[in-house]
Image (cartoon, helix red, strand yellow):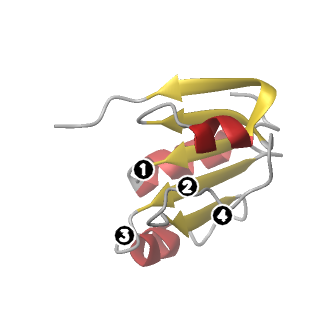
């Protein structure tokens, strides 16, 4: 990760992992899309940092962001929506679901 990367995390990683990533992105942005029930607590846990944003996942799987915005995306699967918001030279990392 580079300091100015714009990173999308699809799923809800632990807040401490998000904080570590945000600290590395000194000029970048971390956007996390997670289950609606977990977003309020996650926002509170990361409220002290300015470059983290949490969004509730939509029922239709739509990602409310402009096309080609994110340089890096970590997601559990490759989907049309993920590819839509990935920059042309961006990097998609498929994360295995925890069991």
- The image quadrant where one finds the C terminus is top left
Question: SS at mark 3?
Answer: loop
Q: CA distance from mark 3 to mark 1?
A: 10 Å
Question: SS at mark 1?
Answer: loop
Q: In the shown orientation, is residue 34 left or right of residue 52?
A: left
Residue located beneath label 1 in the image: 11
Residue in the foreground of this view, choosing between 4 and 79: 79
Residue in the foreground of this view, choosing between 18 and 92: 92
Residue located beneath label 3 in the image: 38
Residue 16 lies, in percent from the top left, at 43, 52
Please name which of the two marks, 2 or 4, marks the residue nearer to the observer: 2
Please name which of the two marks, 4 or 3, marks the residue nearer to the observer: 3
Residue located beneath label 4 in the image: 49
Q: Are marks 4 and 1 in contact (CB under 8 Å)?
A: no
Question: SS at mark 2?
Answer: strand
Q: Can residue 18 be seen from the camera position used here?
A: yes
Residue 39 lies, in percent from the top left, at 44, 71
Among the two numbered marks 4 and 3 on one chain, the one whose residue lies closer to the N terminus:
3
Q: Residue at x 67, y 23 (%)?
A: 91
Q: Are marks 3 and 1 in contact (CB under 8 Å)?
A: no
Q: CA distance from mark 2 to mark 4?
A: 14 Å
Q: In the shown orientation, is residue 88 left or right of residue 49?
A: right
Task: Count neighbours of disc 1 (C-alpha within 10 A) and say few if under 14, some if 14 to 19, many if 20 or more.
Answer: some
Residue located beneath label 2 in the image: 32
Residue 53 location, quadrant: bottom right
Task: Count neighbours of disc 3 (C-alpha within 10 A) and say few if under 14, some if 14 to 19, many if 20 or more.
Answer: some
Q: CA distance from mark 3 to mark 2?
A: 11 Å
Task: Count neighbours of disc 4 (C-alpha within 10 A) and say few if under 14, some if 14 to 19, many if 20 or more.
Answer: few
């Amino acid at each position: 990760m580079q300091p100015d990367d714009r990173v999308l995390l699809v799923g809800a990683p632990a807040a401490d992992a998000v904080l570590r990533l945000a600290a590395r992105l000194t000029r970048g942005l971390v956007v996390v899309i997670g289950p609606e029930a977990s977003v309020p607590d996650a926002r509170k846990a990361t409220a002290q940092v300015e470059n983290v944003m949490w969004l509730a996942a939509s029922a239709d799987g739509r990602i409310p962001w402009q096309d080609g915005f994110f340089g890096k995306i970590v997601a559990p699967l490759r989907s049309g929506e993920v590819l839509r918001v990935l920059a042309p030279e961006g990097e998609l990392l498929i994360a295995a679901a925890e069991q």
